Every structure is written in C-alpha cells, then in structure tokens.
Image (tube, grey):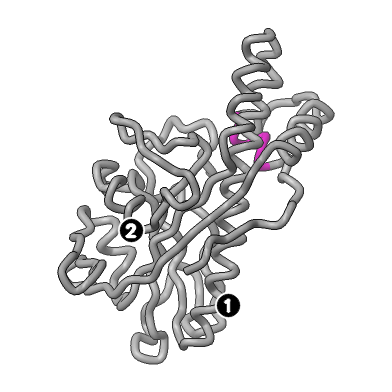
Amino acid sequence: MPIYNSPVFAIASDETKRYAGLQKADFNQQLIDEACLEAQLLIQPKGIWHIYDYEADRQLLHASDTSSLVLQGDSIGRHLRDCCKVIVMAATVGEAIEDQVTKCFEEGRYSFSVLLDAAATTAVEQVADAMEKTIQNEVKRQGFAMKWRFSPGYGDWPIQQQPDILRLARGADIGISLTESLMLMPRKSITAVIGLYYPAVNPDCRLPGTASGTDRPFEKKHNCRLCDKLDCPARRE
C-alpha cells in the first residue's frame, strides 16, 4: 500500500485534556487550546499499511510464501476470530513536536509541556482514525467488514511482538524505528492490526452492541475494557 500522507487537521481539545489526565479537572481551557494549535503546526503525520492473509484457527499471519507470524495471546485471537485477512498498520506524527515538548519542559513551562505532549498523542490517534476510514472505504468494495484496530500490548498480546508488527507494517518507510526496550521512535507513533472478514460468510461475527453487515461501522479506537492498565489516567470509564 502507498504511504498515507494525512491532510492538515484540528487536534481535538477534549481528547487532549483526557490524555493529560485532566478530564475531571477544571483546567484553563485557553491553555489547552493553545497547546492543540501549536501541536497542529508542528506535527508531520504519516501512515502506512499492508494486507496479509490470516488463519484465525492458528492465529497465523502469512507475510509471504516462506514467512509467517503466530500472533500470541488469547485477546488477539478472540479479536481476530473469523477473520481471513489482517491489515498491519503504522502511524506517526514525527519528531518535531517531541523536540518542542522537551524544549518547553527545559524552559520551565511544565503545564504546557504536558499539554503539548497530550496533544501529540491525540494527533497520532486522529491520524490512525483517518487511516481506518480510508482503509474501510477500500476494503468495503472488496466485500470485507472491519474489526477495530488492536495494538501490541493490548490485553495479553505481548509487546515483544512489536518488532515483527513494525516490520510487517514497513514502518521504517515512514521513519519509525524501535529502541532496545521496544519503544517506538518517534515516541508519538503507533502500530496496530485490523482484522477483515466476510460478513456474508460469517453473519454472526459482530462486535458487542452492534449489528452485523457490511454497513456496520468499525468500533472506534482502543477498547479500554480489554486493557489491564486500570490506573491509566486516560482510561475511558
């Protein structure tokens, strides 16, 4: 698939506030808006994705005729149940905004630094959301329905598979790399998989609270119910 070059977009202030852990706080809205605007000027959003065949019963992703990857963990297995293909994707907003976050902190602008960092997190999630919509339009024409995106580290899917997922997404093509501790660089980057299935073949394959069918919208973003990090300040209740 070609590299996804995101158009310019406004960064959601409500999500920025949530990622900053301030969703229940009476905080200066003007400062939040200023951080979102500065982040909008600094981000360099890009994405990339590739589609692979998938055997759900073996949790086996076929990268090529001679290469395959077993996706480890019960949660990813349940999530991709009945899927016959998997999209592996990566997205980033670049390094410039991280440099500015560091600069603001070093200048003693601690609150603004936290907000700018949260705005960058919001931005990369918005890039991934936009990619999903683009992907959905493409795969729907092929008769597929989509599951929502699922990243290494969610549930019991071990983060140790991050190198394989980044490689399969070809994240290096948009400047994403990994540290020895498996942290994505630039930090405001994500990888994920999206399961594809034929709803006509599997009419009972549906997400909780949704109807089956090709017109069913994908469930948006990370599902906090499947994450065991109960003390996360950005957790949705």
Discs 2/1, front: 2
User: Which residues, given as a range, are shown in magenta?
Assistant: 15-20
Q: Which residue shows up at 29% across the image and 42% down it?
A: 159
Q: Which residue is mark 1?
A: 137
Q: Is 95 on the left or on the right of 159, as rendered?
A: right
Query: Which badge, 2 or 1, comes first in the chain's sequence?
Result: 1
Q: Which residue is mark 2?
A: 168
Q: Nearer the viewer, residue 108 or 13?
A: 108
* Amino acid on which the number 1 mark rests in the picture: Asn
Q: Quadrant of residue 113?
A: top right
Residue 162 placement (x, y as % from top left): 31, 46
Q: Is 145 on the left or on the right of 183, as rendered?
A: right
* Amino acid on which the number 2 mark rests in the picture: Leu
Q: Is 53 on the left or on the right of 19, as rendered?
A: left
**Predominant secondary structure in magenta?**
helix
**Above or below, 97 relative to 84:** above
Question: Judging from the image, what secondary structure is the residue with disc 2 in?
Answer: helix
Question: Judging from the image, what secondary structure is the residue with disc 1 in?
Answer: helix
Residue 70 placement (x, y as % from top left): 18, 60
Pointer 1 local density, CA inside 10 Å: few below 14, some 14–19, many at least 20: few
Q: Which residue shows up at 43% across the image and 68% down it?
A: 147
Pointer 2 local density, CA inside 10 Å: few below 14, some 14–19, many at least 20: many
Residue 19 on the magenta span? yes
Residue 213 placement (x, y as % from top left): 49, 85
Q: Quadrant of residue 134?
A: bottom right
Q: Is 154 on the left or on the right of 185, as rendered?
A: left
